[in-house]
């Protein structure tokens, strides 16, 4: 892969992504399905733009999963991970064991040997981290109970791969198909050691990663950050991830698990956001590439040769996987809607199955032809997941009633309040408290889960959720609420919410917080009538107090501020008009305004028409009386 | 048709069932309803706008509850700021010349209390002497007050009667066929056909 060949391939893959993904998004199918379909389209059974090397690309692109877990780890504080220990060990452990046993049992019924059945069961018990997490993330469900549970199970599966690889050679019944090609477990540094020493080495490596992350990496990043070369920081971040992945592979651990641990260790560090934003694009591209490769690798020859068998397999796998997870979820007291999301998210077989399948043919556990049919079925289950989740979201979940209830809050939002407040930081809180103090019901949406926790502790009814999602706004009652108070911190996010609301809930009146003048213009342009610059009120009050401190009477200072506010708000609207109309040079207008304001400031408030305050001024009356010109009305 | 401007001032309208009902009639053809406490909760009266509004109308109704024998605070602020020297009175100040001014008042006490021998020792019209004098100085023609007395004890069917009477009051202000001149001397504004049932 060098020279023109490489660029040709890159061109094909990128073009497929750029064409297919926006289309899939437009159709509401999500990016994962878009990538998969793109893969099918350019694959050997589509346009034949890429051939058999799809498999190689897939192995390469699997690194996206490794990066994904690093990023997931970065967002996961150790405390939260500790809270997840029950789902990881309980839910995860049971999911793997029960699914493997059920599938092994079914395989026996189909006439496979028990060793084969067990191997197939273990392979199919795994789910795809890439597909499940990416789909959940795209739907904004990662932080719901279903999302957290899916994550916990996937994490356990990553750990479970290690004993599986150790177990597989013991299940061999066929003649080994040839050793050493893939052989993830056989070329490690530790494979020649006795079991106890291997375990020690593995634990030591994990501990080493924790130590390195804790003590060494910070200094490294500090030194790199000092160079002020952004690309060097990116290089360092990539180096860290690749290094850990290599190390983990060498000791026979899943590289994804290693980078996940590193991510968790670095979650508390000051470089967290930097690392996240550096790794994120690589992660996204590689995952996309991975999904395309999966699509391209679906072997439609096998499917065409025995469609009944393959689709029967696909249906059976998906049914068993969904049934097991659904049962476990209900046993673990998840609500029905969360259980459904959880079960559908994990209904596919994971990418690691491809590795295990080739590994097991090499070790003579499975016959080549059954492995081929299984591989085709596995790829199909992956491709079907986004579709299944879509179907469940559209058809099943609405019938269950509650839609994805927010994190740690199994109740759906039942309040039907006239006011929705999006964002419950220092801004939204004051609005919310004032409204509640006056008996107005308020539904609060906040997407920072820490903030949600704190606010709940103070007795506020706050729902975790992202106001960007129109379905969540819907559950919050945007359909019949009168007002949306938009108090989110980030200006870009506020604008997005405005667009969503204008599109889906045009009747909802928006009162929006604005950070700056520019932000205020943007909001007005987006059609928001009520815009509030966040520091304006406070600044005015400081101005009043400053005037008073300089000897102004309180009422005069107050009137001056009122007049100033009126003038300034009028100017803001005028400027927004000019900006929108674009018939006047914007910069010219800004300069005019600025010089006008300066004039106002120089000449003292009383000189300016709009800021002048003649109230209670009796100078003209005195003059009138002094001159004897005062007119007395005749009797009317 | 005379153009009627209802300047309404009530700091707690949500607590006044009588006024809420009355002002339902204060909108529509030829009547401009102008809710001062709703427009200027911070007492920051827009003088230019108010003056423009006054010049556009022929009859000015000051509609308010009677607080300590006078207008609510914002109404006084409005008078202080809007009726400027040189505009409403004094040299060059004849913007309001010839316009009619009338108070529409709701009062908790009954009519009998507003008599020389009653609890309040003065008639309602006597209480409004400052307003009458203001009207005079501003070249306006003052009309006796339209009043709803005894609001504290009003039954709901009486509220309905008052609402109907208020509607006819506004009608008579609008209707140029009705000469207002003969009504000026009375203690109360005599609404044509507006006699109430005994209460």
Image (spheres, coloured by chain):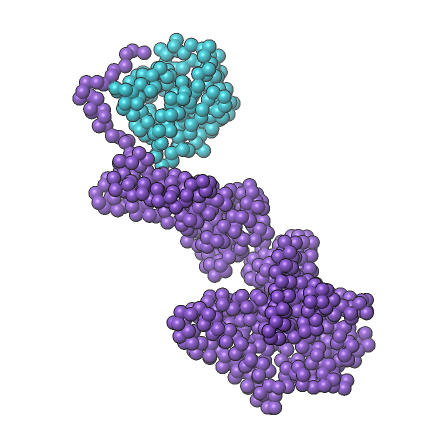
Chain colours: A purple, B cyan
Residue A193 against residue B69 in the figure, above or below: below
Closer to the camera in the image, B44 or A603: A603
Residue B36 as seen in the image, left or right of residue A359: left
Q: Residue furthest top?
A: B182
* Residue drawn at 48 percent across, 69 percent down: A275
* Residue drawn at 55 percent across, 86 percent down: A200
Q: Residue furthest left?
A: A626
Q: Quadrant of the N terminus of chain A?
A: bottom right
Residue A211 against residue A326 in the figure, above or below: below
Residue B68 location in percent, x, y? 33, 27
* Residue drawn at 57 percent across, 83 percent down: A250
Residue A3 location in percent, x, y? 59, 73
Q: Quadrant of the C terminus of chain A?
A: top left
Residue A395 against residue B67 in the figure, above or below: below
Residue A166 location in percent, x, y? 65, 83
Residue B149 against residue A28 in the figure, above or below: above
């Amino acid at each position: 892969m060098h020279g023109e060949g490489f660029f040709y391939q890159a061109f094909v893959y990128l073009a497929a992504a750029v064409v297919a993904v926006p289309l899939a998004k437009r159709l509401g199918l999500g990016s994962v399905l878009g990538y998969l379909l793109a893969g099918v389209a350019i694959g050997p059974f589509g346009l034949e733009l890429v051939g058999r090397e799809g498999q190689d690309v897939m192995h390469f692109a699997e690194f996206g999963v490794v990066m994904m877990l690093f990023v997931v780890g970065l967002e996961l504080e150790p405390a939260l991970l500790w809270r997840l220990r029950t789902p990881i060990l309980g839910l995860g452990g049971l999911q793997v064991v029960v699914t493997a046993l059920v599938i092994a049992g079914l395989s026996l019924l189909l006439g496979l040997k028990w060793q084969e059945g067990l191997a197939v069961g273990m392979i199919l018990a795994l789910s795809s981290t890439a597909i499940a997490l990416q789909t959940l993330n795209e739907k904004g469900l990662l932080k719901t109970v279903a999302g957290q549970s899916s994550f916990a199970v996937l994490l356990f599966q990553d750990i479970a791969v290690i004993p599986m690889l150790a177990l597989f050679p013991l299940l061999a019944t066929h003649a080994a198909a040839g050793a050493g090609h893939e052989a993830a477990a056989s070329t490690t540094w530790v494979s020649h050691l006795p079991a106890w020493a291997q375990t020690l080495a593995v634990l030591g490596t994990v501990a080493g990663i924790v130590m390195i992350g804790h003590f060494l990496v910070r200094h490294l990043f500090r030194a790199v950050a000092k160079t002020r070369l952004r690309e060097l920081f990116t290089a360092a971040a990539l180096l860290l991830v690749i290094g850990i992945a290599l190390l983990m592979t060498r000791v026979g651990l899943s590289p994804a698990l290693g980078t996940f641990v590193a991510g968790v260790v670095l979650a508390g560090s000051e470089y967290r956001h930097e690392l996240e934003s550096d790794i994120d694009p690589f992660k996204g591209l590689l995952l996309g590439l991975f999904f395309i490769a999966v699509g391209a690798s679906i072997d439609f020859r096998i499917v065409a040769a025995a469609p009944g068998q393959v689709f029967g397999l696909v249906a059976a796998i998906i049914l068993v996987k969904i049934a097991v997870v659904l049962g476990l979820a209900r046993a673990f007291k998840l609500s029905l809607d969360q259980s459904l999301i959880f079960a559908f998210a994990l209904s596919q077989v994971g990418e690691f199955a491809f590795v295990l399948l080739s590994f097991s043919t090499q070790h003579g556990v499975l016959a080549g032809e059954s492995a081929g049919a299984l591989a085709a079925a596995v790829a199909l289950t992956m491709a079907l997941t986004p579709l299944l989740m879509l179907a469940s979201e559209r058809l099943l979940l609405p019938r269950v009633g509650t839609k994805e209830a927010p994190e740690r809050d199994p109740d759906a939002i039942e309040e039907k309040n006239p006011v929705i407040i999006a964002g419950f930081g220092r801004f939204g809180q004051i609005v919310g408290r004032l409204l509640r103090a006056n008996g107005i019901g308020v539904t609060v949406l906040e997407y920072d889960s820490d903030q949600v926790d704190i606010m709940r502790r103070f007795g506020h009814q706050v729902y975790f959720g992202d106001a960007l999602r129109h379905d969540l706004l819907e559950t919050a009652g945007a359909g019949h609420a009168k007002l949306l108070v938009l108090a989110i911190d980030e200006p870009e996010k506020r604008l997005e919410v405005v667009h969503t609301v204008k599109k889906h809930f045009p009747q909802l009146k928006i009162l929006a917080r604005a950070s700056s003048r520019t932000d205020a213009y943007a909001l007005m342009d987006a059609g928001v009538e009520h815009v509030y610059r966040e520091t304006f009120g406070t600044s005015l009050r400081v101005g009043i107090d400053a005037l008073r401190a300089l000897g102004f009477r309180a009422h005069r200072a107050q009137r001056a501020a009122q007049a100033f506010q009126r003038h300034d708000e009028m100017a803001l609207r005028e400027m927004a008009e000019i900006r929108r109309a674009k018939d006047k040079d914007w910069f010219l207008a800004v300069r005019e305004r600025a010089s006008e304001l300066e004039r106002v400031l120089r000449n003292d408030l009383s000189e300016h028409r709009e800021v002048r305050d003649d109230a209670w001024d009796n100078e003209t009356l005195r003059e009138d009386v002094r001159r004897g010109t005062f007119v007395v009305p005749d009797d009317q | 048709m005379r153009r009627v401007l209802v300047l309404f001032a009530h700091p707690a309208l949500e607590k006044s069932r009588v006024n809420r009902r009355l002002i339902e009639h204060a909108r529509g053809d030829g009547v401009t309803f102008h809710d001062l406490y709703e427009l200027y909760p911070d007492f920051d009266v827009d003088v230019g706008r108010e003056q423009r509004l006054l010049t556009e109308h022929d009859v000015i109704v000051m509609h308010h509850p009677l607080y300590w024998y006078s207008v609510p605070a914002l109404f006084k602020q409005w008078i202080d700021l809007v009726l400027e020297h040189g505009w409403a009175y004094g040299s060059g100040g004849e913007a309001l010349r010839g316009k009619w001014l009338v108070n529409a008042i709701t009062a908790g006490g009954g009519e009998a209390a507003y008599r020389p021998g009653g609890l309040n020792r003065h008639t309602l019209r006597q209480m409004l002497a400052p307003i009458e004098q203001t009207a005079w100085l501003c070249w306006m023609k003052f009309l006796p007050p339209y009043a709803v007395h005894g609001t504290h004890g009003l039954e709901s069917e009486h509220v309905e009667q008052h609402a109907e009477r208020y509607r006819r009051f506004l009608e008579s202000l609008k209707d140029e066929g009705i000469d207002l001149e003969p009504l000026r001397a009375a203690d109360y504004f005599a609404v044509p056909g507006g006699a109430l049932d005994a209460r």
